Each structure stands twice: as structure tokens, then as C-alpha cells.
């Protein structure tokens, strides 16, 4: 199979760093160019990737590299529509960072553009390629815990704003400036915008869509942020499964000094944990760990061979397969739209102070 000639369209999103090794090492990709937003980002990129041409203007990048077949779209959320249009007009396939758009009119325009152009648009939700999650899906399919009845899940991280300030700017993250609720000093665009994974994952685990959603915000840990960093979400799926989700930025960025010479603790940066309750048992899952525990028993566990880059390799493999063979990716714009609807319903629930039906 001929490698797909791919470029990084923007280096704004935090996940771009995770792609560098995959783009360099994958025999299925030929990394031909990148586009940075400013001089500082360009300089940093060139220092670590000297063999990849880097531009400040995406038009120049496309003109100098007319052989580009695909891009990793990694700009601020507010720029996605214009860049999807630029790619669709050139017949360029798109591997898009979360979130395509929270504005459903813009979102539907993206669907129209990519389908009319006949290009692949895959959404980067890497948990669909996580080996631990795949084991969980098999266990559920085998009926190990019986029919699924309830899901408790966390998708918590530190705040990315210290490294990627745009994620704390409502206009860039959410797309516009909307207060969380009347009289609330915070705006839409924070932790919820950063964590679509757990919303998408519960749809995959249950095979159902969201029916009702209720969200509550806690006072911010980071008082200087304009956007939310702590919230909880609960509700019910269309198959009757209930859920409780924590998509917060509740991990702290600081190192903690403890007694003892030279001892410092670096807090865990992120976690995606699941507790899945079925009619005949429970699964406890750390999506970034090697074990799935059945009923919490230390000896009753399923061990999964896992490395951090497995999910990125799987994601890229599917993207290349879709580009080369004219397939539709699992996580396409139409699939992901229901996840965006649910996340918007969370914000609507915060605004109204009551559950929202979808």
C-alpha cells in the first residue's frame, strides 16, 4: 500500500505532540509538511522535527505541497469549519481533532462539504482503538456481567490551558461567548469541551443514545479561568442504562513536595476509569492500565497487553484504510453528531438548572 502523504494543519491542539512519533514511524504515512500559528510554535516544532517543512500560512503549505492527500486538523475549534472547507475543496482527507464544532449549523455544513467532496473525515476519539476498551466490549458481548444497567465513568485531567491558552477562551473553544447560566461568571468552553471521549464511549458500550441529561457545575478550582473546570453529569440512555460521568479538569498541574531529600510527587495527569454494573456482576476498568477486574476481585481479572501508542496506531491504521479503500470510518461526522448534541444538552442543563431531554 502506498503511504498517504499527510500534513499537520495547525499545531494548536494538545494532542498534536502525541502524533509526532506515529507520523514519523508509521510505514503507512509520509509526513510531508506542517503549519504553525506563530513564530514561537514554528521555532519549537523545527527544533524537534527538523526534517519536516513548517509554514506559517496554510495556503502556502498547500501550494508548495500539491501532493498532500490528508491532514491532521489540529487547530482551535473555532477554525474548523473554514479549514474543513479548504480541505474539501482540494479533495484532501481529514483526521480531525475533537471538537469539530458545537454549533450544529456549522457541524451540518461540514457534513455537507465532506460528503459532497467524497473525502474521509474521521474524528480523533482514540478510546475506540484502546486495547483495554476492546477487551471490555468483548466481555460485555460475551455476557460476563449480563445486561448492562449502569455506568459510572471518569474522564479527568489537569487543565490544558497552561500550555494551550486557547482552550480557556470561550470564543475559541466553544465558538462563542455563552454564560453557563444567568448570573454565572463562567462561560461555556472548558472541561466539558475537552472531554467528549467519555460521552462517545458510553454510546459505544451501550449501543444506545442519550435520552435525558442533568449536569451540575462546582465552583472552579482555578479561579482565574473564564470557563468551567469542575462538573458532574448524570442521566439515562434510550435502552434504560443510567450513567454518572465526571469530565472535569480536577487533576492539578503543580508538583507536590513531600518530606525527604529530593522527593517530589507529580500528580497523575489523566484518567479514564469505568465501573460497569450488569445484572450478574460488575467490571472495574482503568482504560490506561493493563487489567480489567471482574467484581473487583484481585484474582478475577483480565490482563491486556497495552502500550500508550496502541490506540494512536489503531486510529491511524483505520484512517489510512478508509482513505485508500474508500471506506467510512467508525467515528465519522454523522456518528459523532449525537455526542455533540449530548454535550450541548449538558450546557443547556447547566443553564436551566434541570434535566434536559434529547
Image (cartoon, rainbow, N blue to C red):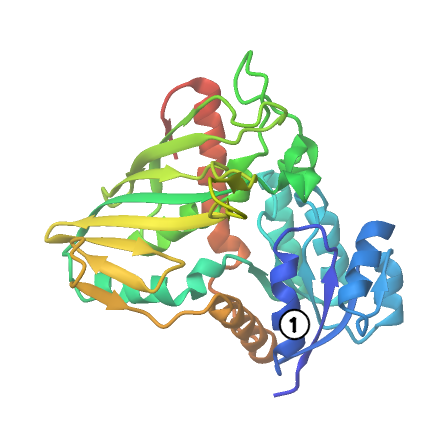
Which residue shows up at 44% across the image and 66% down it?
A: 129
Q: Residue at x 41, y 18 (%)?
A: 353
Query: Would you place residue 159 above or below residue 28 in this image?
Result: above
Percent position (x, y) of residue 247? 44, 39
At 68% from the left edge and 43% from the top edge, which residue is drawn? 164
Residue 36 seen in render:
no
- Left or right: 22 with respect to 287? right
- Image quadrant where one finds the N terminus: bottom right
Q: Which residue is mark 1?
A: 23
Q: Nearer the viewer, residue 133 or 257?
A: 257
Q: Is residue 334 left or right of residue 272?
A: right
Helix, strand or loop at label 1? It is: helix
- Residue 94: image quadrant is bottom right
Q: Residue at x 62, y 65 (%)?
A: 19
Which quadrant of the view contains residue 24? bottom right
Residue sitting farthest toward the left: 280
Position of residue 107 measured from the top left corner of the image (x, y, whole percent) = 60, 46
Number of labels in the image equals: 1
For this orientation, the residue located farthest to the bottom is: 1
Q: Nearer the viewer, residue 154 or 197?
A: 154
Across and down, in percent, residue 208 comes to 31, 49
Q: Nearer the viewer, residue 241 or 114?
A: 241
Q: Residues within 10 Å of mark 1 (few under 14, many from 20)?
A: many
Q: Nearer the viewer, residue 305 or 330?
A: 305
Q: Position of residue 352 (x, y in %)?
A: 44, 19
Amino acid at each position: 500500500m502506498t503511504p498517504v502523504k499527510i500534513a499537520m494543519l495547525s499545531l494548536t491542539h494538545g494532542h498534536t505532540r502525541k502524533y509526532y512519533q506515529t507520523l514519523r514511524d508509521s510505514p503507512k504515512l509520509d509526513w510531508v509538511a506542517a503549519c504553525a500559528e506563530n513564530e514561537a510554535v514554528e521555532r519549537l516544532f523545527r527544533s524537534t522535527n527538523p526534517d519536516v517543512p513548517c509554514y506559517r500560512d496554510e495556503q502556502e503549505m498547500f501550494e508548495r505541497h500539491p501532493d498532500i492527500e490528508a491532514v491532521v486538523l489540529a487547530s482551535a475549534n473555532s477554525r474548523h469549519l473554514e479549514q474543513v472547507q479548504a480541505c474539501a475543496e482540494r479533495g484532501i482527507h481529514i483526521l480531525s481533532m475533537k471538537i469539530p464544532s458545537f454549533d450544529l449549523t456549522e457541524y451540518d455544513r461540514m457534513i455537507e462539504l465532506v460528503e459532497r467532496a467524497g473525502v474521509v473525515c474521521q474524528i480523533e476519539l482514540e478510546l475506540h482503538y484502546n486495547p483495554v476498551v476492546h477487551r471490555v466490549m468483548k466481555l460485555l458481548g460475551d455476557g460476563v456481567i449480563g445486561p448492562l444497567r449502569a455506568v459510572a465513568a471518569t474522564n479527568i485531567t489537569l487543565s490544558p490551558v497552561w500550555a494551550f491558552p486557547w482552550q480557556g477562551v470561550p470564543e475559541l473553544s466553544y465558538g462563542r461567548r455563552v454564560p453557563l447560566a444567568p448570573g454565572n461568571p463562567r462561560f461555556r468552553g472548558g472541561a466539558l469541551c475537552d472531554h467528549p471521549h467519555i460521552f462517545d464511549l458510553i454510546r459505544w458500550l451501550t449501543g444506545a443514545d442519550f435520552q435525558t441529561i442533568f449536569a451540575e457545575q462546582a465552583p472552579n478550582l482555578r479561579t482565574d479561568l473564564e470557563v468551567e473546570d469542575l462538573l458532574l453529569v448524570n442521566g439515562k440512555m434510550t435502552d434504560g442504562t443510567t450513567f454518572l460521568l465526571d469530565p472535569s479538569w480536577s487533576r492539578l498541574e503543580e508538583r507536590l513536595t513531600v518530606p525527604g531529600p529530593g522527593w517530589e510527587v507529580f500528580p497523575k495527569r489523566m484518567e479514564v476509569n469505568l465501573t460497569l454494573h450488569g445484572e450478574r456482576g460488575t467490571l472495574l476498568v482503568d482504560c490506561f492500565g493493563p487489567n480489567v477486574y471482574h467484581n473487583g476481585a484481585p484474582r478475577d481479572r483480565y490482563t491486556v497487553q497495552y502500550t500508550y501508542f496502541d490506540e494512536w496506531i489503531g486510529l491511524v491504521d483505520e484512517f489510512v484504510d478508509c482513505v485508500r479503500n474508500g471506506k467510512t470510518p467508525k467515528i465519522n461526522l454523522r456518528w459523532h453528531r449525537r455526542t455533540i448534541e449530548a454535550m450541548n444538552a449538558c450546557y443547556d442543563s447547566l443553564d436551566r438548572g434541570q434535566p434536559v431531554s434529547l
